[in-house]
Image (cartoon, helix red, strand yellow):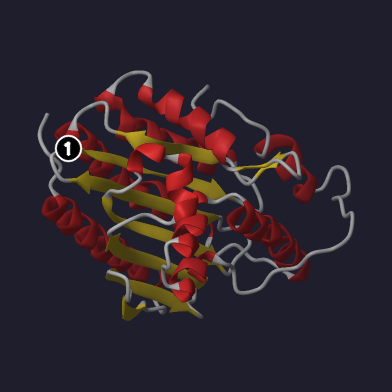
């Protein structure tokens, strides 16, 4: 098995951040990412890039981070006892884009690499990541395109890969306390090392490079649709589910906070405006109800 190569992974992740930011700026037309480089006192750092007040994207960020240390936080190593006493490096690109127009869905993507080392012992490493889509108003054309793009990225790595990672995504991005999905899913995976470093790294690159192919056409189709106060209100209400998931369940958020990551960068994923209301449900037969009835339940979006 080829030993993991941090330099290659780092170079790819930095280039991925550049490429995604460039494409999203082109799509927005007005908004620009502002870079905020930071250092972690305990080891490592990153470059946070945030767009605010764009023509298309109300707020979003595309972040690169690389942190390292002599030992993982106790809360992290408790669930993985084999990592105790090992030096670690964790790096990745993570992004969330919150659109202004409610007909444009929010998107999230992440690709990451983890390495734990100890003298005279083999390294422990894995890749993880994926992407998922959170629409406020559903369009079957968009959902099919999103999942078809994910499926095509997975195809060279095995017939079962997309279906397996789609199921994982449907299970992971689920609000148990609400008994509902966060969105229409996509693909999600973790602890990927069984293919060896080279093939696993190739897969990560296929996933990272396909994100823009999946998201950009959807944004361009919906960004000019007219909307009013009703649609905007529903968007803000549904954003509350996004916040709930990230603060209660999201592994990346929890690991970042527990490992002493930069709080501003970690919580960049939060939407700028959110609403909660007590015991609300959409009126039957409305487009808002259709989201719950047609799009949030798990579906095979590749079926004709």
| Count of numbered marks | 1
In the displayed structure image, the side of residue 271 where residue 7 appears, left or right: left
Determine which residue is flagged by label 1. Answer: 121
Q: Residue at x 43, y 57 (%)?
A: 73
Residue at x 51%, y 73% (from the top left corner): 59
Q: Provide residue 145's location: percent of width, then percent of height.
A: 45, 39
Of 124 and 9, the residue lying toward us = 124
Look at the image and tell me whether residue 27 can be seen.
no
Instruction: Tell me, yes or no, if residue 42 can be seen here.
Output: yes
Can you say whether 113 is above or below 32 in the image?
above
Looking at the image, residue 244 sits to the left or right of residue 14; the answer is right
Residue 276 x %, y %: 79, 64
Indicate the quadrant containing the N terminus: top left, top right, bottom left or bottom right. top left
> In screen coordinates, is 111 left or right of 176?
left
Q: Is residue 216 above or below residue 63?
A: above
Q: Position of residue 265 (x, y in %)?
A: 44, 71
User: Within 10 Å of the Cα at label 1, are there few (<14), some (14-19), or many (20+) other Cα atoms?
Assistant: few
**Residue placed furthest toward the top:** 159
Q: Residue at x 59, y 66 (%)?
A: 101
Q: Secondary structure at mark 1?
A: strand
Front-lying residue, 201 or 116: 116
Q: Is residue 284 left or right of residue 83?
A: right
Q: Identify whether 56 is placed above or below 5.
A: below
Q: Residue at x 54, y 51 (%)?
A: 250
Q: Position of residue 196 (x, y in %)?
A: 19, 30
Q: Nearer the viewer, residue 136 or 6?
A: 6
């Amino acid at each position: 098995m080829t030993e993991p190569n941090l330099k290659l992974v780092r170079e790819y992740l930095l280039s991925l951040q550049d490429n995604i930011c460039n494409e999203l700026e082109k799509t927005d037309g007005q908004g620009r990412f502002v870079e905020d480089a930071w250092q972690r006192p305990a080891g490592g750092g990153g470059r946070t890039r945030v767009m605010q007040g764009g023509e298309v994207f109300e707020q979003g960020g595309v972040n690169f981070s690389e942190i390292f240390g002599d030992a993982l936080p106790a809360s992290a190593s408790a669930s993985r006892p084999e990592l105790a006493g090992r030096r670690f490096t964790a790096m990745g690109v993570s992004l969330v884009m919150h659109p202004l127009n409610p007909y444009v869905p929010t998107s999230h993507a992440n690709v990451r690499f983890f390495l734990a080392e100890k003298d005279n012992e083999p390294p422990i490493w894995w890749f993880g990541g994926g992407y998922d889509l959170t629409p406020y108003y559903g369009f079957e054309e968009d959902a099919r395109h999103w999942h078809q793009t994910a499926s095509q990225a997975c195809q060279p790595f095995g017939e079962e890969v997309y279906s397996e990672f789609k199921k994982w995504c449907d299970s992971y991005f689920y609000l148990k306390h609400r008994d509902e999905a966060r969105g229409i899913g996509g693909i999600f995976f973790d602890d990927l090392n069984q293919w060896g470093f080279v093939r696993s790294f190739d897969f990560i690159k296929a996933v990272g490079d396909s994100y823009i192919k999946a998201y950009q056409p959807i944004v361009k189709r919906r960004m000019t649709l007219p909307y009013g106060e009703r649609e905007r209100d529903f968007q803000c209400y549904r954003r509350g589910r996004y916040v709930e998931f990230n603060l209660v369940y999201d592994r990346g958020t929890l690991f970042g906070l527990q490992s002493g990551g930069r709080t501003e960068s970690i919580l960049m994923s939060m939407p700028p405006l959110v609403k909660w209301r007590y015991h609300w449900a959409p009126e039957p037969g409305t487009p808002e109800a259709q989201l719950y009835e047609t799009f949030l339940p798990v579906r095979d979006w590749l079926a004709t």
